[in-house]
Image (cartoon, rainbow, N blue to C red):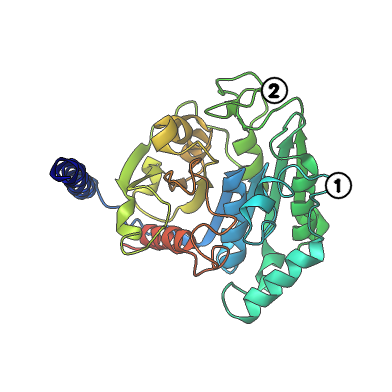
Amino acid sequence: MNEWVCHVYGWRLRFVVLLACCGVHAGALAESLPRLPGLGAQGDTVTVSGLSAGGAMATQFHLAHSATVRGAAIIAGIPYYCARHSALRATTACMSPNMLARLPPVMTLVAEVDKQAAAHAIDTPAHLADSRVWLGVGSRDEVVKAEVVELAAGFYRHWLPAAAVRFETIPEAGHAMVTPDGGHACAETRTPFINQCGSFDTPGRLLAWLLGELKPKAEQANGELRVFDQGEFTRGERSVGMGDKGWVYLPRSCLGGGCRVHVAFHGCQQNDEAIDDAYVRTAGYNAWAESNRLIVLYPQTRRSLTNPGACWDWWGYTGPDYHTRNAPQIRAVQAMIERLAGK
């Protein structure tokens, strides 16, 4: 009996030591990372984009802060409130619908927007009339079917003029960010989910749609790709699902202030914990940002037992307010934008 007690106690002691070491490591990491700078950026003309779960978060962030977010791009993304707090619905009807798992009607999603706006949990959707939205999906995407993204387009058309919503099918593309410098063949669907489909340039297309005519893409992104202490914006939050560090691309011309901000939400399995800096360096935003005085914010998730793919929360793993201004992830990203807009 004593031998068994000693064995159990020994394992518990080692577990406590492990937790203590992890806590020390996390604290040391936070102390070693620089703060996100205040750069006098334009905090009231924000645009957002994202792939897959990142596309779902881009929509949620857009609806939550439509007074200051002027456009959103959804690449193989899921409509607002499609999952309705259900992980099962999220992985069936909201990604690959069928006769037994159907997509919700547009008006079900619209009703949720009206409900949250009436509760002052999101900005009034009347602001959406001034937005522009770009949506895209690969013709060979078997992860998120085209009809899902088409529903997202129909959802936006409830408030936006038809001419302000652009939907594109990316020929032969799998489930991925498509950029001329992508490392995988067009039809593939595998990590890091960055493909090449000839000259198709998803970041260039979506930024031009959201921002208007762009200057030509820079030959090289010669600005600063900085890592920063993201934990500063999430400490005290339980189950926030975000990493200790984030990334931001700063063109040299933006260090003096006055630049616009674009938030690029990565997809599942695309956080830096999974693929290091592959997304923030090669997703294709930075060269466009360099020549167009655009700060690109790359917030990061982290994996957990309830979210092993490190997806942004679009079904409720952080709590019932996941799709409102009260969501911990949305609050954290908004605080980052406000920091960039400050001095």
Residue at the image point whose x is 60% and y is 81% from the top: 119
Whether residue 159 is visible, yes or no, is: no
What residue does disc 1 label?
Answer: 99
Residue at the image point whose x is 82% and y is 49% from the top: 100
Residue that lies at the very extreme toward the right in this rendered image: 99
Front-lying residue, 212 or 280? 280
The CA distance from mark 2 to mark 1 is: 26 Å
Q: How far from the left and from the top, in percent, is residue 7? A: 18, 40
What SS does tag 2 mark? loop
Q: Counting other residues with Cα less than 10 Å from the Cα at mark 2, is it few (<14), some (14-19), or many (20 or more)? A: some
Is 55 positioned to the left or the right of 339 in the image? Answer: right
Front-lying residue, 127 or 120? 120
Upstream in sequence: badge 2 or badge 1: 1
Vertical comparison of 126 with 177: above or below: below
What SS does tag 1 mark? loop
**Location of the C terminus (image quadrant):** bottom left
Q: Counting other residues with Cα less than 10 Å from the Cα at mark 1, is it few (<14), some (14-19), or many (20 or more)? A: few
Q: Look at discs 2 and 1 and give the one toward the viewer.
A: 1
What residue does disc 2 label?
Answer: 187
Residue that lies at the very extreme toward the front in this rendered image: 1
CB atoms of marks 2 and 1 within 8 Å: no
**Location of the N terminus (image quadrant):** top left
Vertical comparison of 188 with 71: above or below: above
Q: How far from the left and from the top, in percent, is residue 302? A: 41, 45
Front-lying residue, 110 or 1? 1
Three-letter amino acid code at disc 2? Ala
Vertical comparison of 121 with 131: above or below: below
Three-letter amino acid code at disc 1? Met
Residue at the image point whose x is 71% and y is 49% from the top: 94
Whether residue 72 is visible, yes or no, is: yes
